[in-house]
Amino acid sequence: MLVDYSLKMPKNIFAGEHGLENIEHLVKDAKKIVIFTDKGILGANLLEIPIQILDSLGKDYEILSDIPAEPDYYQAQHMVDAFKATGADFIIAVGGGSVMDVAKLASILATDEYTVKDLLDNPLLAKKQVPSLMIPTTAGTGSEATPNSIVAVPEKELKVGIVNPEMIADFVILDGRLIKNLPMKIAAATGVDALCHAIECFTSTKANPFSNTFALEALDLIMNNIIEACTNSEAMDAKNKMLLGSFYAGVAITASGTTAVHALSYPLGGKYHIAHGVSNAILLMPVMRFNEPVIKERLALAYDRVVHQPTENLTTVDEKANYMIEKMGEIVKTLEIPTSLETFNVPKEDLDVLVEAGMQVTRLLVNNMREVTPEYARKIYLEVL
């Protein structure tokens, strides 16, 4: 556990049944607002309440919705350029991780001094230029809480995390109404992504009292609500708890960081365009089993927090650790998320390419409590090929 540690969070977070109504006082001084979103959000009419509020205030606003799922840095730059052309002085992002990640980049690239490509090599170049409000429509990527923006780098067939504390949102709204009718497939993939954030941060080499506080609470909320939230559109209590758990897991990322699950999943998104949450779900069990010998005490602590009414008399560290790993696997299976790369026609002949790409993600691999060598990475990938 780290001896020195820190935590940076959004300035103001609003949550609960009427969270969206806070937009009114957050934008009161804004002259022009840009809403970042995507076509799916528009089609689902999830902008109805935010737009009603802006219209009632007589605010000038523009909607930028051409954000693809999991964009590459060229596409992200295109959206940043479109934002700069508006001259807006306030950003609202309504969407999932990709929408929020692009909006965060726009908030620090409002001048022509740097580009998204420049930040791939030196993410700390840019400074906050425009205040931002993040409103997640999944629970979730946790992007509303983090200083991270994930973009694909096509020439490397890899996803890269641009990390800059200046990208942390000024404001966040967590409102369960926005995830009420989320399709199960999306809810499940993003929910397991949040689960991965929580367990990885809790078992990271950079884990510390700040990250542990948020990661444990996130685990409790997510593991006890994810199935109900994903399978029952009327389960608003579970959905609100998932939004909160996702946010807490995002905060844990800012205080510590994810590990080998995320590191080894990046090539799956970059090369095969597998959804980020699904990539993590595929690798969750193999990495947890690989890490179990060195993280089992942490897993046992997590068991004590998460399991409120044990149905079995588990007393040893090994028993509790095994329960936690099996429970995570059960969640993935119940939510019908693929657990094999066969589903995506990834050939075994690509194993060497996967290993080489995965081993490049040193930013996250160094957080893993058990060293991941190329040989171990090969074994992990082979389990899911």
Image (tube, grey):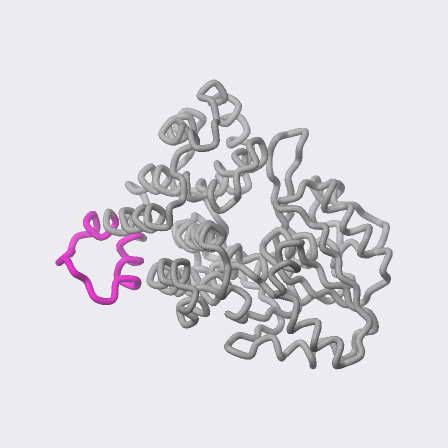
Residue that extends furthest to the left in the rendered view of this protein: 313
Query: Which residue does the image show at 79% across and 78% down from the upper left?
Result: 29
Count the marks.
0
342 in relation to 49, above or below: above
Q: Nearer the viewer, residue 194 or 238?
A: 238
Q: Is residue 119 left or right of residue 82?
A: left
Query: Which residue does the image show at 49% across and 26% down from the upper left?
Result: 355
Query: Which residue does the image show at 48% across and 61% down from the upper left?
Result: 246
Q: Is residue 314 left or right of residue 211?
A: left
Q: Nearer the viewer, residue 375 or 60?
A: 60
Measured as percent of width and height from the top left, residue 123 is found at: 69, 47
Residue that extends furthest to the top in the rendered view of this protein: 349
Q: Quadrant of residue 172?
A: bottom right
Quadrant containing the C terminus is top left
Q: Is residue 5 visible?
A: no
Q: Nearer the viewer, residue 105 or 79?
A: 79
Q: Quadrant of residue 383?
A: top left
49 in relation to 93, above or below: below
Q: Is residue 111 left or right of residue 108?
A: right
- The magenta-colored residue range is 299-321
Q: Quadrant of residue 166?
A: bottom right
Measured as percent of width and height from the top left, residue 339 is found at: 38, 38
263 in relation to 212, above or below: above
248 in relation to 26, above or below: above
